[in-house]
Amino acid sequence: VTGGLAPSPIVPTVDFQADGVQHGFLRLPHSRDDSAWGAVMIPITVVRNGDGPAALLTGGNHGDEYEGPIALFKLARTLRAEDIRGRVIIVPAMNYPAFRAGRRTSPIDDRNLNRIFPGHPDGSPSERIADYFERYLVPLADVVLDYHSGGKTLDFIPLAAVHELEDAEQQRRSLAALEAFNAPYSLLMREIDARGMYDTAVEAQGKVFVTTELGGAGSASARSVGIAERGVRNLLIHAEILQGEISHRPTRWLHMPDGCFVISEDEGLLEIAVDLGEPVRAGQVVGRIYPIARTGCATVDYRAPLGGVLMSRHVPGLIQTGDCLAVVAVECDPPSF
Ligand code: CA
């Protein structure tokens, strides 16, 4: 525990040093009208078999993204201690109040868990969760996988991603882990704003960090869940925690050049003009926005800022000013690492 901060109020009901499989909770005190001495009970599974490398696996950082929780509730139920060496820590729904509510952000404090790292032990419930990961769980891990999808408002081609990192050795280890995860698309990712993200906090601790965007639209598909399950198994084998052979399939490498985001400056009815995964030319119309106050108005056309593949799109039928309408990524050669 570092930083001169107070100890976390979160109490784990599992022993991170014990061998075997433990299903328990991170117990976060939350006194409220319907439970005076109540707590938020965040499910956690710890599987340990002696000394060795450690993986921290999370979903539900945003509560309306489902491939991670499905893959991790399943893994927590099936992973046996004798199958591994070292330790696997599984938290299927990091921001558990948001997950219970089917929301991106917490209904308790309206905070977006992935924008408030490093959090604070005296902060709101979401800030306390962030702080617990920052100071207690991430330091236990060598490799961290945080599943994301697009939630209710975005949809993605199925991709796994690492960020561009300054440390060449950390970048090399991250790319190797990304390749092992082996999603249909592998992305060198750029964030609109990386401040306060779990990703950034984990990378700052020198860990190997892999994230995903496996779909979205507020649900999951058989295909996207299959990619999530195969990916985590591959990653655990790569980390020398799980025995077995990595299952390799073709992956397409992508990067996100400057100006790849198409941001709406209008509100209205969205007609998406290109489907996910389809190629786009620079200048091609990717979406049209219809003003909805009256008929007879001209649409506003939104064009691809560059040529590439449609990586992400806005999901709801109506769009607002400032919404991300689409993202165009560019295919590239596999990086060397
Ligand atoms: Ca997300």
Image (spheres, grey):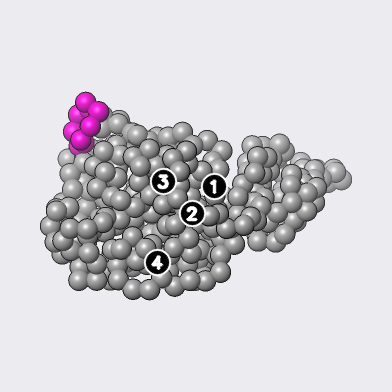
Which element carries disc 1, helix, strand or loop?
Answer: strand
Bounds of the magenta span?
1-9
Quadrant of the rendered image containing residue 10 = top left
Q: Residue at x 65, y 56 (%)?
A: 331
The local crowd at label 4, few if under 14, some if 14 to 19, many if 20 or more residues have their Cα within 10 Å, is many
Q: Amino acid at mark 3?
A: Gln
2 or 1: tag closer to the N-terminus:
1
- Could you tell me residue 279's position as x and y percent? 72, 59
Q: Residue at x 35, y 42 (%)?
A: 206
* Circle 4 residue: 234
Check residue 129 in the rendering and tell me which mark sits there, or answer none: none
Q: Amino acid at mark 2?
A: Phe
Q: CA distance from mark 2 to mark 3?
A: 10 Å
> As displayed, is residue 235 above or below residue 125?
below
Front disc: 2 or 1:
2
Q: Amino acid at mark 4?
A: Asn
Check residue 189 in the rendering and tell me which mark sits there, or answer none: 1
Q: Residue at x 48, y 64 (%)?
A: 182
Q: CA distance from mark 2 to mark 1?
A: 16 Å
Q: Residue at x 29, y 45 (%)?
A: 138
- Could you tell me residue 46's position as x and y percent? 22, 58
1 or 3: tag closer to the N-terminus:
3
Which element carries disc 2, helix, strand or loop?
Answer: loop
* Circle 3 residue: 170
> Contact, CB < 8 Å: mark 2 with mark 3?
no
Which element carries disc 3, helix, strand or loop?
Answer: helix
Q: CA distance from mark 2 to mark 4?
A: 18 Å
* Circle 2 residue: 337
- Could you tell me residue 78's position as x and y percent? 28, 71
Please check the rendered image and state whether residue 332 is part of the magenta-colored stretch, yes or no: no
Q: CA distance from mark 1 to mark 3?
A: 15 Å
